[in-house]
Image (cartoon, grey):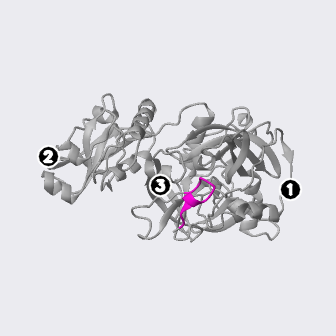
Amino acid sequence: MTNFNTNPSPRGNHARPAELIADSAAFDIDRSVAASVAETVPGAQSKRSRTFLTGFAGAAMACMLALGINSAVINPATAEAANEPAPMSQAALTPQNGETLAEAVAAKCLPSVVFVETYADAGGQLQAMGTGSGVVMTQDGYLITNNHVVDGGQAFKVTIEGNTYDAELVGTDPSSDVAVLKAKDAKGLTPMEIGNSDDLTVGQWVMTLGAPFGLEQSVATGIVSATSRSQIMDASESAQAGGSGEATIYPNMIQTDAAINPGNSGGAMVDADGKLIGINTLITSYSGNYSGVGFAIPANYAVNLANQIIAGETPTHAQLGVSLSTVNDQMAGSYNLPAESGAYVASVAQGSGAEAAGLAEGDIITALNGEKVEGASDLMLAVRGEKPGDTVTLTVNRNGQEQEIQVTLGDDAASQKAAAEAKKQLEQSMPDQGDGYGYGQDGSNGYGYGDPYGQDGRGLNLDDLFGQR
């Protein structure tokens, strides 16, 4: 398994999934291609042509490295002025003049695919950190990408249809791995048409587009291998990978066998109509490169967050309003709990949807909307996959009796500041969390296995709850 920490580029990740991979495989975050020379970002837009040799030279250093939205209803007449994505179209893409489906989709989508270069300040000189991909959202230059593509960068260049622009970072949502760049002085760009990632079928045709190994304007085809693949990357894994050091939650990802390689992160996954259905983000691999199992953040989820960032808002996520701990059969036996699996409610936040619905400390949540909840992580991922304001049905074991409780989800805007402060305190003092999983108030940015974020600044495992640390 590749040790990404030995490479000059800080990109990459060795997070291990609980369900998606075999014990010896790595669940790797897309790693950007490392660059070996310092380079100053030009101050103005320029036209350029890249040769294969140039692109490959930048990629060669990473050959052994791993990868590293509710759709809005848009008024076409005001899309550019309002910085909104292109309108959703119902027209199916029909290949013309004998072209194949792949040729037709590539011709439609490639003008909207972005090559992203990230630079760090190295003693007053801009040092190339790596490269990734992005997708054009608006005619005037708003672009969506992954947070890990831009994380740690102080300057950015983007190339769209052969034109290179300086770019500024508009905002990020590290807990969802989404970021927005703005190409300076751009106009007349081609926004990618947004599809519906909630309406996917296993086996349907897809295409991935981006810049694997720095090779711009590359495409690959495959199928949707599975949907609803969820993963939590805890804070320590993120930090080891050179990321933000915040926990990252990936709910309901799209799995595909279309090639995703280093540099594809932030690029597009599109359907047979050439509509955006996902943002390429992760792979599962023994080698760190493409092995037929890649993942994309659903477009409905990612674009919704990007639109919030463009609007100048802090991205928010659905929140139940409880602190949780995981119940397993061992814990159930030790503490005489009425259920052998589920999410134990350690506390309920005042003013939350959970409090309004009547959830109480000691409840064990065993299902959400009929889907079984094995532990705190399952519930957290399920809630993150919903939207603020949605009403969900929880199956709750209370004192051995099951009942269904409907809860209207809130959002985590108020808790994000507190979570950030708790994270700082955590970094200064890392208490031993034992073998339990300590989860903070769900929906906040402070999540991760053993990360003590909670309403009172620390999470709780069952040993904490019962005084037997």
- Of labels 3 and 1, earlier in sequence is 1
Residue 284 shows in the view: yes
Residue contact at pointers 1 and 2, CB within 8 angstroms: no
> What is the x, y in percent for residue 402?
19, 49
Dot 3 or dot 2: first in sequence order is 3
Residue 61 vertical placement versus 111 (above, below): below
Give the image quarter of residue 12: bottom right
Q: Is residue 10 magenta?
A: yes
Q: Are marks 3 and 1 in contact (CB under 8 Å)?
A: no
Q: Amino acid at mark 2?
A: Asn
Residue at the disc numbered 1: 49
x, y percent for residue 151: 60, 45
User: How would you rate the neighbour count of disc 3 (Cα within 10 Å): few for under 14, some for 14-19, many for 20 or more?
Assistant: many
**SS label for mark 1:** loop
Q: Which residue is mark 2?
A: 399
Q: Is residue 390 visible?
A: no
Question: Circle 3 — which element?
Answer: strand
Q: Residue furthest left?
A: 336
Question: How far apart in space, not on screen, are marks 1 and 2 (Cα)?
Answer: 68 Å
Amino acid under disc 3 = Asn
Residue 214 among magenta residues: no
- Residue shown at 76%/66% (left/top)? 103
Please state the extent of the stretch shown in magenta in the rendering.
2-12
Name the amino acid type tagged 1. Ser
Write the residue at 77% across / 49% down.
159
The relative height of residue 334 versus residue 1 in the rendered view (above or below) is above
For residue 252, the mark is 3
